Image (cartoon, helix red, strand yellow):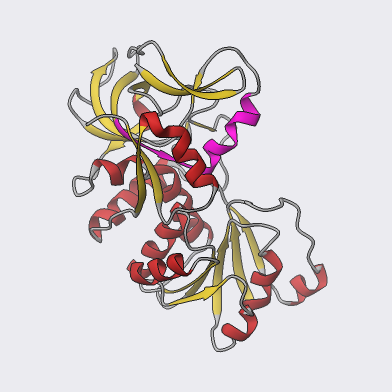
Amino acid sequence: MKAFVIEHGELKITEMPEPTAQKGEVLVALKTAGINHRDLNLLKRHGNKPEPLIIGSDGAGVVEAVGEGITNVAVGDEVIINPALRWFANSEAPPPEFDILGLPDHGTFAGKIALSAEQVERKPAHLTWEEAGGLALPAMTGYRALFTKGQVTEGDTLFIPGAGSGVATFLIQFAKNIGARVIVTSRSEDKLAHAKELGADLAIATDSDWEKELENETIDLAIDSVGAATFNRTLDVLKKGGRIVIFGATTDDVVDFNLRKFFYGQYQLFGSTMGSRDELRELISHMEQYEMHPVVGKMFQLEQAQEAFDFLKDAKQFGKVILRISQ
């Protein structure tokens, strides 16, 4: 089967042996797969190892075979892949055995994948394959950050620096579904316009004066994945006692901030990453209740995976970048 792999420190399309479903596993013939920023960083992490590694965390497809002992999944079932390995019950933090699909295990950028039957969930019937293929990782990340950690409620105002990522598009939709007010920022006029079309109440330029732009707003919750470039600016517009949830750092990891200002302001800071199977099932029910559709930014064929990586790396997307694996 064709696969997009890391081999000898290089990304390439190559032929890989088809996997088989062992005891407790299912074999999924993949239709689509979603590219995440995590995938862009795997080349450094895998290094120059000679054994090819199929990367990719998100995907959706049809169950082609089941291993011994499987009763909850049947051949022909349409499923999405849960990339949060071995994190089943919602908890304050991931368990020690938690990992993310795509390193060190083979991932989803291939014709087929064999994995534990506990790592697949039914595909929501109202979603297309393109929408389903990039769902789980960004949706779980956004759902946990917004509801489990951020404790957003109806009437809250949510602030999202950076409007174009896959997670941000889920955050906008989740928050609007439950009656929150949403404010976003972006350097791109097109992304600001798309965010408003998706439901954002206010969209402002990243390089604008946030304090002036938001002087009449009360920001209850901010969810940020940018890191050092936006942390202090976000803190400056957050209400006293407000909450910040951090789930990533696309700029520098290390942030300097005024500790005295922080504790006098009674701010609350939460870290978040991915999500549990419980949260994945909750968000699937949420999406079905609101007939919610993920935003697909651009489609590529599997053979165009490197082009898709470059597109995501240049931050050109609004929504998910999806690989079409098969028809």
Vertical position of residue 24 compared to residue 199: above or below: above
- Residue 33 lies in magenta, yes or no? yes
Residue 241, how many percent across, how many down?
64, 75
Vertical position of residue 192 compared to residue 149: above or below: below
- Seen as rendered, the residue at the extreme bottom is 216
Is any part of residue 325 visible from this angle? yes
**262 left or right of 183?**
right
Residue 102, how many percent across, how many down?
49, 28
Residue 217's image quarter?
A: bottom right
Residue 236's image quarter?
A: bottom right
Which of the two residues, 320 or 264, is positioned nearer the viewer here? 320
Give the magenta part as a residue range.
Answer: 31-46
Is any part of residue 274 visible from this angle? no
Residue 211's image quarter?
A: bottom right
Quarter of the rendering occupied by the C terminus: top left
**57 left or right of 42?**
left
Quarter of the rendering occupied by the N terminus: top left
**240 left or right of 101?**
right
- Residue 325 lies in magenta, yes or no? no
Which of the two residues, 188 or 52, is positioned nearer the viewer here? 188
Residue 40, how many percent across, how many down?
55, 38
**183 left or right of 287?**
right
Picture residue at 48% right of the left edge, 53% below the top: 316
Which of the two residues, 153 or 248, is positioned nearer the viewer here? 248
